Amino acid sequence: MQIFVNEMPLKRRIAYLKSKGKTIGFVPTMGALHKGHLSLIEKSNFRCDITVCSIFVNPTQFNNKEDLVNYPITIEEDISKLKNANTDILFKPTERVIYPPDTNLDVEIDLEGLDNLWEGKFRPGHFKGVVQVVKRLLDLVQPDFLFMGQKDFQQFTIINMMLEKLNMATKLIVVPIYREKDGLAMSSRNIRLTKKFREKSTILYKSLVFAKSVYGVKTPEEIESTAIRMIKDQGLNPEYFKIVNGETLRSVVSVSDNFVIAIVAAWAGNVRLIDNIIIKHEK
Ligand code: AMP
């Protein structure tokens, strides 16, 4: 695995690989890698000739300083996991490489309000930071395919809108949520859960499975309020539990909506967790 920190050597390598006709798959991450991240690497390896993974804890997407300071960093383990997973290139830039001084990297696109819903409402400015860093990384890596997790549903929906609106040549591929045996969605933040909250956190997946099982029998409002109660009963503090259209991320209009998901965010002690489930997706 080759490791690049700076812009020019990375760009030269990618240009060379492209000149040889290689397809490039890209998996952006913030490190503290787990099996969810590795499932993205695996998909990229399967689909593309070359897999590039980036590790960059992007300060502009953290609305909460404490969350940024406490974000886990496990770079030695990450490197060995990436090597074992047959990653071709690791891009591990410094903040200066991503955000060179005196350079405006704001991405001026209308996200049609998607950035102000759910995660955007509870984490103001988060998606502005996500769009900015993903655009910058895509400009550097120039991948044919971008691999992102279904775990961050709103994130990939917004990035897809960005790819379309900017007419970018990269195609997004969404990879299903990788879970622990007991259903908890894998997340870098899980290692910060106390033993008690680690056990209680399984309620998130249970509440999503419940929502899916009664959708169409009970109204979305009934399901949402029951799910919120289930989560509170376990001592977690939910920010939202919503049943929404999988494209617009707004409330479902009727049972005939053909793409429906349930999304949830909750605090387990001082760790914020998110999860979702696809309730139905008829094409
Ligand atoms: P992060 O390092 O948390 O920014 O995540 C990097 C990428 O991995 C994003 O596209 C996430 O959606 C994806 N990801 C995170 N957790 C999981 C998971 N449990 N299953 C699948 N993909 C995931």
Image (tube, helix red, strand yellow):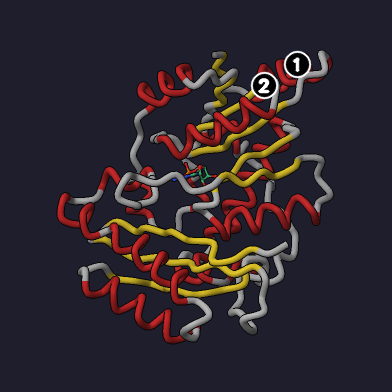
Circle number at residue 50: 2
Label 2 crowd bin: few (<14), some (14–19), many (20+), radius 10 Å: many
In the rendered image, which quarter contains the N terminus? top right
Residue under pointer 1: 17
The answer to whether 99 is drawn above or below residue 91 in the figure is below
The image position of residue 148, as x and y in percent, is 59, 44
The answer to whether 207 is drawn above or below residue 133 in the figure is below
* Left-right relation of 36 to 157: left
Q: Earlier in the sequence, mark 2 or mark 1?
A: 1
Three-letter amino acid code at disc 2?
Ile
Asked if marks 2 and 1 touch (Cβ < 8 Å), the reply is: yes
The image position of residue 113, as x and y in percent, is 66, 72
The image position of residue 142, as x and y in percent, is 74, 32
The answer to whether 180 is drawn above or below residue 20 in the figure is below
* Left-right relation of 15 to 191: right
Q: Nearer the viewer, residue 204 or 121?
A: 204
